[in-house]
Image (tube, helix red, strand yellow):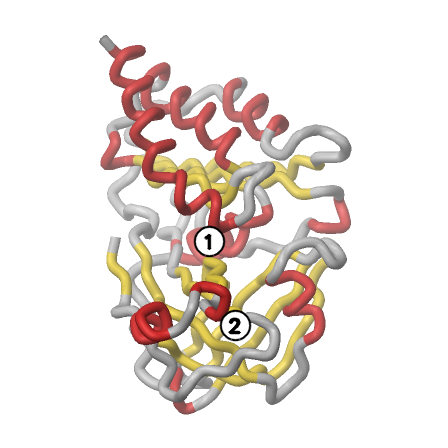
Amino acid sequence: MTERPKMVTTARVLRTERPTPHLVRLVLGGEELTGLPVGEYTDYYVKLVFPPSGVTYQEPVDLAAIRRDLPPEQWPRLRAYTLRAWDPLAGELTIDIVHHGEVGVAGPWAARLRPGDPVMFVGPGGAYAPSPEADWHLLVGDESALPAIAAALERLPVDAPAKVFVEVADAADEQPLPSPGAVELTWLHRGDRPVGEALVTAVTALDFPLGDVHAFVHGEATFVRELRRLLRVERAVPRERLSISGYWRRGMDDEGWRSSKADWNRQVEAEETTASA
């Protein structure tokens, strides 16, 4: 995975959109975006920077200096979001943020933004793009993975086969996902079920095509763990043909999940090794 040095970029809101009821689309611009290193991957992400209320930082913002010189209660919160699009000619960076009322940090903040407001972020980083050599592609995710899935579908080779499963709250949260590939897209509506339950059921029941698969599975950590075991152990997908990660975890805030994610990954890998022995 590549990630830009931890410098803070300050962009400005050009406009906001509401493509679905639970999504706020931010379109950012500004001179600081010139030369943004986006292009190779389809899962580029940035970490949005949220200072505590009433706290301002000296420009240019230096996270290392903040953590060195200020008390912890004045440190910013960081929230990772995948880029939906980057238009270098127009200088426009698009980020989709899930919004469920006043729950969380980023959703309510995004819903209040207006043109001209500053948005600070660190990055981008990225690691995945659909391989043109794959015989077919599998893309699976909840709302948090939808921007990366949408970007990947736009990058598929012409007529490349792809099985795509996206879970959202209900039909109102579906959106167009154009692609030059031969895409079989399945929208799954969560309703009252736990996040990812429908995805696990659908992918487990999938009749896998023959040939080399390149898979992308991202979203809530519980379902990602189940599908990782399915793909790595039961389907024997090689590690290098699989991009898989828990973006978030039920019952944890982002700080708690990030602090425990390394241990979680080690535990999952140990379980895979035992199951494959």
> Disc 1 or disc 2, which is closer to the eye?
2
Q: Considering only order in the chain, which callout, 2 or 1, is on the residue closer to the N terminus?
A: 2
Q: Position of residue 34 (x, y in %)?
A: 35, 86
Above or below for 233 versus 111 = above
Relative horizontal placement of residue 236, taking residue 70 as reference (left or right): left
* Residue type marked 2: Pro
In the picture provided, is 254 more to the left or to the right than 100? left
Where does label 2 land, which residue? 51
Residue 239 vs 55, above or below: the answer is: above
**Residue depicted at x 76% and y 57%:** 101
Mark 1 to mark 2: distance in Å? 26 Å
Quadrant in the picture for residue 102: bottom right
- For label 1, the SS is helix
Residue lying at 45% horizontally and 82% vertically, measured from the top left: 57
Depicted 143 relative to depicted 93: above or below: above
- Mark 1 lies on residue: 148
Residue occupying image coordinates x 39% and y 55%: 43
Q: Relative to the observer, which residue lies in front, 139 or 70?
A: 70
Quadrant assignment, res 25: bottom right
